[in-house]
Image (cartoon, rainbow, N blue to C red):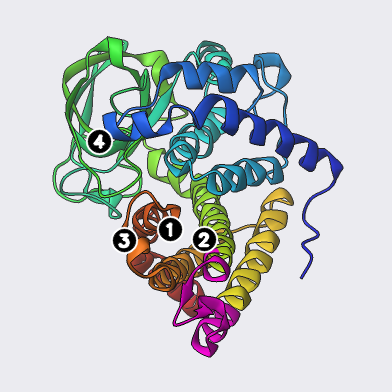
Amino acid sequence: MQRKLYDEDHELFREVATEFNAREIAPHYAKWDDEHMMSRDMWTAAGEQGLLGLAVPEDFGGMGMSDYRFRAVLDEEFARSNHLAVGLAFHLHDDLVLPHLLAYGSDELKERWLPGMVTGEKVTSIAMTEPGAGSDLRSVRTKAVRDGDDWLISGQKTFIGNGISGDASLVLARTDGGTGRGSTDSFSLFMVEKGEGYNTGKQLDKMGLKASDTAEIFFDDVRVPGVNLVGEVGQGLRYAAEQLPQGRLAIAVASSAVARTVYEATVQYTKDRNAFGERIIDFQHSRFELADILTEVEVTETYVDQAILAFNAGELDASSAARAKLWASERVKSITDRCLQLHGGYGYILEYPVAQAYLASRLLTIFGGTNEIMRDVIGRAIAA
């Protein structure tokens, strides 16, 4: 089935992304994986190639490429090159932090952060999750208290991608002075620079995507200038909810790209590998399994492509994004598992991309809101 999502401009952009993966990432990725940290030089190289901050307007140094198909191309190339950790790091920077600044940030915040986010000189993270608050953001306990024109932020965040390597974090904090589970207007968003005083804790050792650093971060009465407030006081949860469709679409896109890549690698492996005097692909079970997988890959691509077009048209609502994320991430989890099985013992060896994809894809049903939460979002929309 031929996809009709992309046109010539997207394919030209794909050439740039492919070259970037080959030149700037492939020679170093294994080292970054071992060190659990990618080079900052990679970020500035990406900026030079125009791969960061695609949606940033020209006034702030970007190209104003609001067409999400370009981001999808980039994710596909990260998946095809087996550089999934870089794709995750870019997702945090471009699909989670950036939309909040573009939609709600003051001109001063935009002037301060957007140009550097485009060039890669400023790397960002998003700090919402806490040890006691994951998908339930109304249980966030990090607090921000006014002190003159500034805010004092105290608390702890965890599972923060780019937390060590990044320069700043978009932080969700409680600003109503209350305790216990907050209301929808109890929280606000702040852009907090690492240099303003937050500390990074230990680097967390993940089962996959190791080249992307993930950490705890701590705030101990960190003084944040009032101008670093993103949007209005008390609107943090509303802003997060409004931007969730893009974040969840990005996970669906990555899931679809990984599923396609792993399927194609498995077809080639089963053609090259022999057992009992026959190619693995010549066994009926292998062909039946691959037939099912291909069908799932193409159905997922078609579904996600429609979600991308809906997002471009401003029509991707929270339930639709949740459905795309739910479907695609569940499919890639199943597909990588079955493809690993078709690789036999080699599938369990980390040198093989299918093993790395298996470990990486397991995050996708958890990240961006667990799939249990996705089902709740969808179910509530059905019942409304």
* C-alpha gap between disc 1 and disc 2: 6 Å
- Give the residue type that dot 1 points to: Val
- CB under 8 Å between discs 1 and 2: yes
Dot 1 crowding, Cα within 10 Å, few <14, some 14–19, many 20+: many
How many tags in the picture?
Answer: 4
Can you say whether 63 is above or below 5 in the image? above
Q: Name the secondary structure under disc 3.
A: helix
On the rendered structure, is 199 left or right of 47?
A: left
Please identify the residue farthest to the right as the structure is shown: 8
The spot of residue 82 in percent (x, y) is: 49, 45
Dot 4 crowding, Cα within 10 Å, few <14, some 14–19, many 20+: some
- Give the residue type that dot 3 points to: Tyr
* C-alpha gap between disc 3 and disc 4: 50 Å
Q: Is 290 part of what is drawn in magenta?
A: yes
* C-alpha gap between disc 2 and disc 4: 47 Å
Which of the two labelled residues, at mark 1 and mark 2, occupies the earlier sequence position? Answer: 2
Q: Which-is-in-front pick, marks 2 and 3?
A: 3
Residue annotated with mark 3: 348
Can you say whether 82 is above or below 344 in the image? above
Looking at the picture, tell me which residue is in the foreground, 240 or 238: 240
Looking at the picture, tell me which residue is in the foreground, 321 or 21: 21
Which of the two labelled residues, at mark 3 and mark 1, occupies the earlier sequence position? Answer: 3
Which of the two labelled residues, at mark 2 and mark 3, occupies the earlier sequence position? Answer: 2
* Quadrant of the rendered image containing residue 159: top left
Residue annotated with mark 1: 354
* Quadrant of the rendered image containing residue 365: bottom left
Residue drawn at point x = 49 percent, y = 63 percent: 322
Residue drawn at point x = 42 percent, y = 68 percent: 343
Residue annotated with mark 2: 262
